Image (cartoon, rainbow, N blue to C red):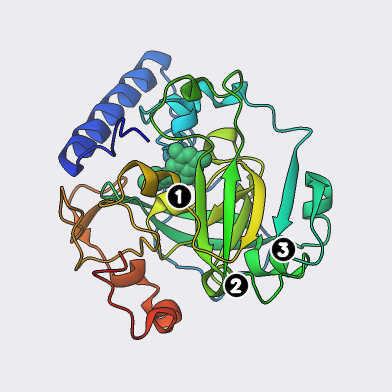
């Protein structure tokens, strides 16, 4: 296993964002039009969740143009530029491992039984930036229960599509493909864990992980794996792509924790995209009340 390119340092990331902002302002001036920002998409049909934050939502334009999706390249602007090369229809998801009802399901059959709801969650990237995103989707637990995991299912793992023809970034070995992530079963079954199919009331754009992506708001953003094609129930803690590439930097839990620094930068503060001054990073990304009990008795410095 090779270590190719770790996440950018926080300071690099800040420069990165400033550069991106300038490029965008430049493009706006060029076109002579203001791009459409937040609001815009009515969402009257979906219920407002008690889990949603009422913090200001990051504009649609930022959420869909400032992305991490290394399958399309490591630059923040690569996913928006290249993700249309990925074909999301037809799409299927293979579910297997320790469960009574494994199978390969067409996306339509995955989605059919679930009514969609909105969850406005904070997303905190391990690099030190954050957003507030109004997701559309359904609880992960409701999906997983359908496959009837057995008592041996202690963890659940997820994989992203592999196809270098559709995902040009996979031609480079920046990570071991497929992108892989995992959760402990109780984390996966927690009511905050969410399968997203949309944001701002519309279907997900490819750069955000269409047609189906995980969202685990109390963990660093890299746990929220995009464009899922495989779900497996397993007995042992599964490998993850980032864990394999730099085990000392990206642990299996990766809970947002201002007290535990990344080996190469502090995690105390973060830049909310669109804000100038940094803000304090909150324990479990502000979801401590809901999730802290999952980790009682665990040393969070060891289990980073
Ligand atoms: N398959 C896959 N999923 C991924 C990533 C990736 O590179 N590949 N990047 C992760 C990281 S580091 C973050 S911060 C979030 C970013 O999600 P967003 O671009 O929708 O904001 O996606 C995560 N999911
Ligand atoms: Mo991230």
Q: Is residue 148 left or right of residue 254?
A: right
Q: Nearer the viewer, residue 273 or 5?
A: 5
Q: Residue 155's spot in the image, x, y percent?
A: 56, 65
Mark 1 to mark 3: distance in Å?
Answer: 21 Å
Q: Is residue 139 left or right of residue 169?
A: right
* Residue 176 drawn above or below residue 86: below
Circle 2: element type: loop
Quadrant of residue 291 within the rendered picture: bottom left
| Mark 1 or 3, closer to the camera | 1
Circle 3: element type: helix
Asked whether the viewer can see residue 28, the reply is yes
Query: Which quarter of the rendered picture does the N terminus lie within?
Result: top left
Q: Between disc 2 and disc 3, whose residue precedes?
A: 3
Question: Which mark identifies residue 189?
Answer: 2
Question: Which mark identifies residue 143?
Answer: 3
Q: Residue 5's spot in the image, x, y percent?
A: 29, 31
Q: Are marks 1 and 2 in contact (CB under 8 Å)?
A: no
Q: Nearer the viewer, residue 55 or 236?
A: 236
The residue under the point 57% across, 41% down is 209
Q: Between disc 1 and disc 2, whose residue precedes?
A: 2
- Residue position marked by numbered label 1 in the rendering: 240
Q: Residue 178's spot in the image, x, y percent?
A: 54, 37
Indicate if the residue with disc 2 has its beta carbon within 8 Å of ligand 1.
Answer: no
The residue under the point 37% across, 49% down is 243
| Mark 1 or 2, closer to the camera | 1
Q: Residue 244's spot in the image, x, y percent?
A: 38, 45
Question: Callout 2: few (<14), some (14-19), or many (20+) C-alpha neighbours within 10 Å?
Answer: some
Mark 1 to mark 2: distance in Å?
Answer: 19 Å
* Quadrant field for ligand 1: top left
The residue under the point 40% across, 82% down is 289
Q: Is residue 175 left or right of residue 144?
A: left
């Amino acid at each position: 296993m090779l270590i190719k390119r770790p996440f950018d340092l926080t300071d690099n990331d800040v420069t990165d964002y400033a550069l991106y902002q300038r490029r965008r302002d430049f493009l706006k001036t060029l076109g002579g039009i203001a791009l459409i920002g937040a609001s815009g998409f009515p969402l009257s049909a979906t219920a407002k969740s008690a889990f949603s934050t009422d913090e200001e939502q990051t504009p649609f334009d930022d959420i869909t143009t400032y992305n991490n999706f290394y399958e399309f390249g490591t630059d923040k602007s690569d996913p928006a530029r290249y993700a249309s090369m990925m074909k999301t229809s037809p799409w299927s998801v293979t579910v297997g491992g320790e469960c009574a009802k494994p199978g390969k399901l067409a996306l339509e059959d995955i989605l059919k039984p679930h009514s969609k709801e909105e969850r406005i969650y904070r997303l905190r990237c391990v690099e030190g930036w954050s957003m507030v995103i109004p997701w559309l989707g359904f609880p992960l637990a409701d999906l997983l229960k359908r496959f009837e995991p057995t008592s041996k299912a202690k963890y659940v793992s997820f994989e992203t599509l592999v196809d270098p023809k559709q995902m040009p970034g996979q031609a480079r070995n920046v990570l071991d493909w497929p992108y892989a992530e995992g959760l402990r079963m109780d984390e996966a079954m927690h009511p905050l864990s969410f399968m997203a199919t949309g944001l701002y009331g519309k279907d997900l754009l490819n750069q955000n992980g269409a047609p189906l992506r995980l969202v685990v708001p109390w963990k660093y953003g890299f746990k929220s794996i995009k464009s899922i094609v495989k779900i497996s129930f397993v007995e042992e803690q599964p490998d993850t792509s980032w864990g394999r590439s730099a085990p000392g930097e990206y642990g299996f839990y990766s809970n947002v924790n201002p007290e535990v620094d990344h080996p190469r930068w502090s995690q105390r503060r973060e830049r909310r995209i669109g804000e100038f001054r940094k803000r304090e990073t909150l324990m479990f990304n502000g979801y401590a009340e809901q999730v802290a009990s999952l980790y009682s008795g665990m040393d969070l410095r060891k289990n980073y």
